[in-house]
Image: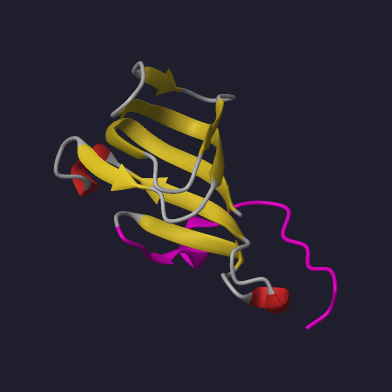
Amino acid sequence: MSDFTSNSSFDRSAAEPFEVGTVQWTRRPGEGDREALASGFWFITPEETPGPMRVVGHADETVYIIEGHLRVEPENGDAFELTPGSVATFNKDTAALWTVLAPTVEFFVYS
């Protein structure tokens, strides 16, 4: 594997099934001998979710919303909404209820 890879845009046709929704990996976990580092585009619609989903982060995570609308309700914090241009960070093991309010494309980085 080279030290550099490039993928300048998201492509829904390149996405594969994920825990909920689909993901297009830009860096898979473990690439470059960095097990904790990964990134990609997450695609999700309200129809793919059972309503509010309890999510517990398995890594530190930073997200950037490209399209869509999410509501996040941390167990120990105030609820907030993510819309295009929003950025949020979550520490590993943070628990929150996530509600997908509109079809969403999110760029994420696990570290």
Q: How far from the left and from the top, in percent, is residue 3?
A: 85, 73
Query: x, y (%) of residue 26?
Result: 63, 62
Q: Is residue 79 left or right of residue 46?
A: right
Q: Main secondary structure of the magenta part?
A: loop
Q: Residue at x 36, y 20 (%)?
A: 77
Which quadrant of the figure contains the N terminus? bottom right
Q: Residue at x 34, y 18 (%)?
A: 79
- Placement of 76 over or under 64, stated as above or below: above
- The residue range painted magenta reads 1-19
Report the front residue among 80 and 18.
80
Decide whether residue 99 is among the magenta residues: no
Which color scheme did the rendering employ for the protein? secondary structure
The tally of labels here is 0
Residue 10: % across, % down = 59, 52
Q: Is residue 3 magenta?
A: yes
**Quadrant of the image occupied by residue 98:** top left
- Name the residue: 50% across, 41% down: 91
Question: Image check: 76 left or right of 67?
Answer: left
Using the rendered view, name the quadrant where residue 25 is placed: bottom right
Q: Is residue 14 left or right of residue 2?
A: left
Residue at the left extreme?
50
Which one is nearer the viewer's eye here, 102 or 96? 96
Up/down of 2 relative to 44, above or below: below
Instruction: Give the farthest residue toward the bottom.
Output: 1
Query: Could you tell me which quadrant the C terminus lies in?
Result: bottom right
Could you tell me which residue is drawn at 48 percent across and 63 percent down? 13
Answer with the quarter of the image where residue 18 lies: bottom left
Instruction: Residue 15: give x, y in percent of width and height.
Output: 46, 63
